[in-house]
Amino acid sequence: MVNQNIIFGAAYYEEYLPYDRLEKDMQMMVDAGFNTIRIAESTWSVEEPRPGEYDFSHVDRVINAAARYGLNVIVGTPTYAVPYWLVQLDPDVLATTASGKNRYGSRQNMDITNPTYRYYAEGIIRNLVSHTAGYPNVIGFQIDNETKHYGTAGSGMLTLFQRWMKERFGTIKAVNECLGLNYWSNSVTRFEDLPDPSGTINGSYACEFAKFQRKMAEDFLMWQSDIVKKYKRPDQFVTQNLDYEWKSFGAPGQQDGYSWGIQPDICHYKAAKAMTLIGTDIYCFDQDKLTGCEIAFGGDLMRSLRDEPYLVLESQAQAFKDWLPYPGQIRQMAYSHLASGACGVMYWNWHSIHNGLESYWKGLLSHDFESNPTYEEAKLLGGELKKLAPHIAPMKKQNRIAMVVSTEAVNALKWFPTDKDLNYNDVIHWIYDALYELNLECDIIFSQAEDWSKYDLLIFPQLYVIHESMVSRIKEFVNGGGTVLSTFRSFMADENVKIFADRQPHGLTDCFGMTYNQYTRPVNTMVDGAEAQYWMELLNPTTAEVKASYQHKYWGKYAALTRNEFGKGHAWYLGTMLPKEKLKEYLLEVAEDAGIQKPKECWPLVVRSGIGANGQKIHFLFNYSSDEKAILSQWKGKDLLNKKEYEIGQKIYLKDWGVCILEENL
Amino acid sequence: MVNQNIIFGAAYYEEYLPYDRLEKDMQMMVDAGFNTIRIAESTWSVEEPRPGEYDFSHVDRVINAAARYGLNVIVGTPTYAVPYWLVQLDPDVLATTASGKNRYGSRQNMDITNPTYRYYAEGIIRNLVSHTAGYPNVIGFQIDNETKHYGTAGSGMLTLFQRWMKERFGTIKAVNECLGLNYWSNSVTRFEDLPDPSGTINGSYACEFAKFQRKMAEDFLMWQSDIVKKYKRPDQFVTQNLDYEWKSFGAPGQQDGYSWGIQPDICHYKAAKAMTLIGTDIYCFDQDKLTGCEIAFGGDLMRSLRDEPYLVLESQAQAFKDWLPYPGQIRQMAYSHLASGACGVMYWNWHSIHNGLESYWKGLLSHDFESNPTYEEAKLLGGELKKLAPHIAPMKKQNRIAMVVSTEAVNALKWFPTDKDLNYNDVIHWIYDALYELNLECDIIFSQAEDWSKYDLLIFPQLYVIHESMVSRIKEFVNGGGTVLSTFRSFMADENVKIFADRQPHGLTDCFGMTYNQYTRPVNTMVDGAEAQYWMELLNPTTAEVKASYQHKYWGKYAALTRNEFGKGHAWYLGTMLPKEKLKEYLLEVAEDAGIQKPKECWPLVVRSGIGANGQKIHFLFNYSSDEKAILSQWKGKDLLNKKEYEIGQKIYLKDWGVCILEENL
Amino acid sequence: MVNQNIIFGAAYYEEYLPYDRLEKDMQMMVDAGFNTIRIAESTWSVEEPRPGEYDFSHVDRVINAAARYGLNVIVGTPTYAVPYWLVQLDPDVLATTASGKNRYGSRQNMDITNPTYRYYAEGIIRNLVSHTAGYPNVIGFQIDNETKHYGTAGSGMLTLFQRWMKERFGTIKAVNECLGLNYWSNSVTRFEDLPDPSGTINGSYACEFAKFQRKMAEDFLMWQSDIVKKYKRPDQFVTQNLDYEWKSFGAPGQQDGYSWGIQPDICHYKAAKAMTLIGTDIYCFDQDKLTGCEIAFGGDLMRSLRDEPYLVLESQAQAFKDWLPYPGQIRQMAYSHLASGACGVMYWNWHSIHNGLESYWKGLLSHDFESNPTYEEAKLLGGELKKLAPHIAPMKKQNRIAMVVSTEAVNALKWFPTDKDLNYNDVIHWIYDALYELNLECDIIFSQAEDWSKYDLLIFPQLYVIHESMVSRIKEFVNGGGTVLSTFRSFMADENVKIFADRQPHGLTDCFGMTYNQYTRPVNTMVDGAEAQYWMELLNPTTAEVKASYQHKYWGKYAALTRNEFGKGHAWYLGTMLPKEKLKEYLLEVAEDAGIQKPKECWPLVVRSGIGANGQKIHFLFNYSSDEKAILSQWKGKDLLNKKEYEIGQKIYLKDWGVCILEENL
């Protein structure tokens, strides 16, 4: 499905243009080396202005023009932003959430289980896809957009949930017991008495409902995918843009936030089943704060879903006020995506929008549609990509480290947070960013992924929820010679978010050679010269070696970091949060246990490696800083960008925000 | 309508008194030199205890007592605080806003378009005005109180809005295009399908609705004014107390906030049409934070509405806990009002209230009704005012600088803020306060005001929204020899808050001799030794001279401040926010271009000048500090307060928080 | 009712156990020296799974097991957490508050005046109490749990409130006048027109409704008590756990807050009438922040309600993440309770809970049910208590100082706060903590308590609301030789929260020898070398001596602290808030006026004294610090814990977080 080309392009909304400039846009895209545009996913009210009355004239115009200019098209179904007539037909199309009934105006405000919505959604999907599938330059379809459950609750959802609970648990007695509903008089005697979870104080019940909500979203994608597959050509792909938790940084309105870790409101592992080509949207700080870590994180997560290439459907162009890229960064960001195994990069979006919420979320072009430095840099990049494609499209990875993540844990820890200033994804990124900065590349795998055979080191950051089967898998992994590292608060609760009633870490006290049953907030407590933060478990080693203890009048007798030999492997446990630099020291020790050598470079010099299209080893070298840097080549090979040859030990100069793509000689 | 007297007095609510002390109050007012009281505007439930049953006994008692003591009376219509029986008659009298249905209890909670409300409002207005117009000492009427649209939405408003949209745009196609409703599937095919804007994500649509909401409030005032005019005597004025955006400073409850710039929720320019005497309420910090700038701002804005004297209907007495005035400040504040052209000053209010929300928003008298230092200072002031009136009542201004402001811009920038910590009025005050502190007096004119002929310098701070006609007026002004200064983010969007699709600044690139299409947040970026803040446009000069550039590795090639010769005039453009002291340097340069000399004094020594009642020049000299200061007289004349004569160059001593009112010899 | 035993135990919820471990738990309790458990108060849905169908099997099992192990049982009625079937029967069981209709899930979400709720509540109470009263080891009943009014409003409450207002005020004219409803047009002409207070802006009206809400809660407890008394044995007590205002410290979810002063939402003075044994819940910081002050405060308040022993029904075990006790603190806290006159200490709760909101509000046992250091310390303590009981159970107090508090004042000051960062209870604790740290023991009495004869010094911190009768009582007290100290903002408003219209302090200007009618926020204002904070009244002495003045250019002429001789006594008035250390200096001076000597020790060395079971004087000596301390014995006597004898002047060594219980020789 993905060919030797690197997909390069942008989202394009002719429907939003203040005047007709289709030909001019197409020419500017071709000038920038674009080969693909994405259209149609936000404009249902234009495509179906009245119920059942379709108008695909914009779609046709754009696909035809694209064809004339040699551009491919990804057509998106517009189901995430409903027209007002649909709400007028059935007000319950607007979802009810814990905050009450949604209002019309925004996107993603509908109840995706509402039958009226489903009826008209099916109509627009069938008609749009059947209308466009025949165009030769339509290479694929995007189903919906950044799909999640949107907190949908309401009476319809409750009824479906009660049925689902019956299927899941069989008896109401099991529900009461597994979720602990006796607490505060919440137990019930019939499935149809299960109350609206919006008011619940029971985290288990709330997480169960969230799981059901996620399932509705996952099923919805599969439903769309099945419809699309009835009409699309076999060579056309089905994709979707998976996104991440969105972390606010305090800017106003729509310009606030960036991609930050695991998505709580849909499970990527399950959602991916609806796609033939995995897609994603990644947004991050740039300027002085461009580190590459969010790009690498998203890429490692997406690629690891199926060990396949993925498409970056949305990458930032000029974006927010805070994010106008420095010279070099547009190029830097694109190569960062490719270095993680992406098969293409598309900007959101082509031109800045003149009305609406995202007017100051700027595209490649500003509101004046003229050239500008950001566009000019994309042009340079487009030229380079055409030459690079035969070498690197797409790159395969062979990582020996994996970090295990869980949608259930991110949800459960919203109810039982480690600290008000530290959520699940902060810990995920704490670990990931340290690995990234050390140039220890890793896969990021979901807890459902069962094959750990290719890894030497598994890391479990705050894996709060654990299914019983994983306990034995971990033991087998270590026993067989693997190395594991767990942080605090892993293995605490079962799949119903019930805290285990036996010794912690549940089922693994022998594996880790320690246990604990007390924890506290660290106050003026040091570990190995670094300040413990947020949470500290008071570890009592049994067979484990104490690698570090707390420095504190009363807690000094407890271990903070332990290492245990178990079978042929090693199990490390870190009971507290420490500054990233201290964590890195420990990670290098752990990696050494797993037979992984300390990398020679570290951030802001980043090395990302893989196997290129022709089987050669490819090394992307990045300089994530405003200063020129030099790096000693560890390889004999050629810079694919400037064709320069390097010997081992030779200096490679990297400009500020520079990149070198080194292909090792075979 | 305004005679040689300076109106001096307070709001008086006999209805709130815990015991009968009318005569005592009247005597204390006379002792303080009062000549006017304001009554009746908050007490509908007393004036009409049951539907249609009127009781004006308090009103009569107070007017009669006032007459005996030689006091004039302004009678206020009580329509801004509805009795509960009105809500019982029709629950929809309580407005629905974006936050839901209002509750009974507060003022300004009603839907001013509700027919039931209008019916009973008309009743109380007709009866109150016809009942009191015959009293010789009733000199005028206040219609309603601090009228705004209060966020009123709801189904009635929506229906009216749909009709209004039809009148404004003619076709629904025009609405979709002008407001960009295709975005996120918001376009509709019929006017009656336009949705409730409460949930909109389209700033253009939201601002259009806000414009409609403001119109309802402006029409409501005109409706009241028309009713009053049917009953009042020709010599009686109609006034209203225009207020400003209210800026919180973090105190609890009702004691939090002060007057801060342009009112978003009614257009003063339009609202003034309902009044024969413009009135206003101004509140500001005092004690160490009394600068005079909010008083001067409010005064310059009010006076400029029609180049007429205005009445300060509410000035603070003891006010909040934070604001008990220092000795001298009651006098200082009153003279500051007069120095801007006010024809009178009235306190809110006479006595502190013993129950209710504003119990700790204190009047001239404390809860014990006894004399106190604040009251004693008002007594001194009252005596002075009687002697001053023939000289200064009221003062005319002849300013050569005008700052152009816009109700549309303040609304639009709530949707598209420059920064979360910087709103429209912050920028307005940034410019105004700098001018004020430099003693560069200015008018503040609304964008609708068409006559710029008397000005040499026009300043456009963040004039985000601009009507096409103004573009050519600006060009003509500069071409004809005028000087203009624009800040960042002016001229960006049209009257529908659609961002212009051509080069910025829209239509004025030749006038300013520069253009830009990128901007960012300044981080560690200096301009001319001062730190750029919040927003920076990357200016590309064409014909303009670069006055200052950004100091930054990547943005250093762009200009921050430009000056262009265009026709006979000069056009300056400042692309970023800078500390006030740096702004002042630039303002002096710009003023010099306009032929305006640098004033000799600067804040805390403030000079405000005008033409007195007898044609002489009057100069108010203020010392806004706790230290005594000296100033060299630039004029030959007489201090009207102490009759002392001054020669040019002679030292004038100003006590802490002191004032000198110098009348130049003719 | 309370015998020579010290009640020692924990709340126990067999209903929440993840597996059957009743016998094991009982054995561990006995090992810890427990003699009592509390059961059943949260589990209505287990006790009555369907309407009218009772199942007390858990209750029976636990009482029987307890009997076998020699443990007594307190049975709680489960009425504070309703089963879902009750909400299904009548949705109005869920209360409507100012925030809208409550949702199902939480506890304390019901309308306690709802007839359906009352009907089923009566059923469960009657059945549970009659079922269990016959068990010999059931020693008492707890009625409901931490009962308050929960902000219950809604139409039923409004109707009852209108009737109550009729009874309180007689005429609607009196309501309008006493509450000042003319303000902002809020007056009405009929009792049935009194509006829902949820939207009111009238603090008097709001406080009147809050008083009514509290009365509903107080009546509800009395109603429960009356039912229980019909079934219980004469030797069984009726108790309830009074709690305090809950002050957030910024932790997430349910783990946030601690006991902080007077409860606003029920009047303890009145609620106590429903109990034969007063009970309370006290939570506080521990670790480095354990000071003992919240424990002492709660104890002094509870004991002073009727000068009787009280039971601590909930004391913290491991509690929150922030609060894992240091070694020694479990013991320290328990003895601190006993030192205030408690007759027993019970933990909340026995084991940590595996599902639900309070999963991380940990009990004595962690989730693994194994022993841990906290449990081990409780074991040591349990052994000690058995030996101590004959000496100290319970201790009587003879304090000469009393602090006067008021539920009406805490409510009124929510409407008229002294500062956004300073509420009523902050001032209460400012005074109390200073006394506590000086080892000046005091009673804390409600304003309703009429007998002041045993006190030499009365302190009135922010007693904002005062009934007329108290004015004369204060005068009599001082005139007769007593000493009083009042802070700022006392005696300002009458029982209707109407600010007095005469000189402040109302009715007491002669007693205090000063008056004032202005106040402000202190800015850079010192008093006697200490910074004035939040509020400063500008005091004008008449006959009073000026003890301290403000240091400020303009406010320097006003007094900050005055002392007046009045009759045979002294009246002090402090017009501002000062740092605690400065306050302590003044308190010692005031105490000296009352003939109370300066204590020899001060915090962190705390001395709490009383009369033991056998008439001897008992002195609890505490070291509230992490360092060992020595104290010179002021008494000849014996340490009851280690039997060591001390002479006067002999050094007593106190370990970190240590305690010595000295019994004076008779």
Image (cartoon, coloured by chain):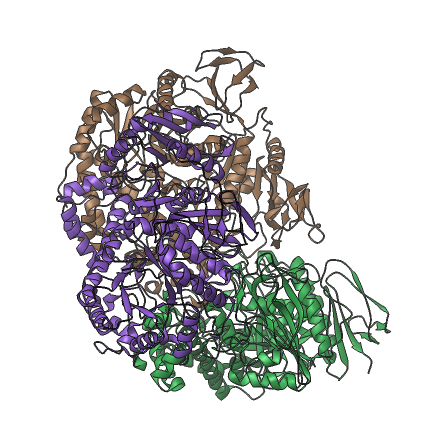
Chain colours: A brown, B purple, C green
Left or right: residue A120 versus residue B356 is: left
Name the one closer to the observer, C655 or C537: C537
Q: Position of residue A469 (x, y in %)?
A: 48, 46
- Residue B602 vertical placement versus A395 (above, below): below
Left or right: residue C524 versus residue A26 is: right
Q: How many marks?
A: 0
Q: Locate residue A181: give its quadrant.
A: bottom left
Specify whether residue A312 is in view.
Answer: no
Name the one closer to the observer, A181 or B530: B530
Q: Residue at x 38, y 28 (%)?
A: B563
Q: Position of residue A71 (x, y in %)?
A: 25, 23
Name the one closer to the observer, B325 or A326: B325
Specify whether residue A339 is in view.
Answer: yes
Q: Locate residue A2: give its quadrant.
A: top left
- Residue A619 vertical placement versus B208 (above, below): above
Left or right: residue B654 versus residue B404 is: right
Q: Residue at x 32, y 22 (%)?
A: A3
Q: Residue at x 62, y 78 (%)?
A: C513
Name the one closer to the observer, B21 or A481: B21
- Residue A493 vertical placement versus A298 (above, below): below
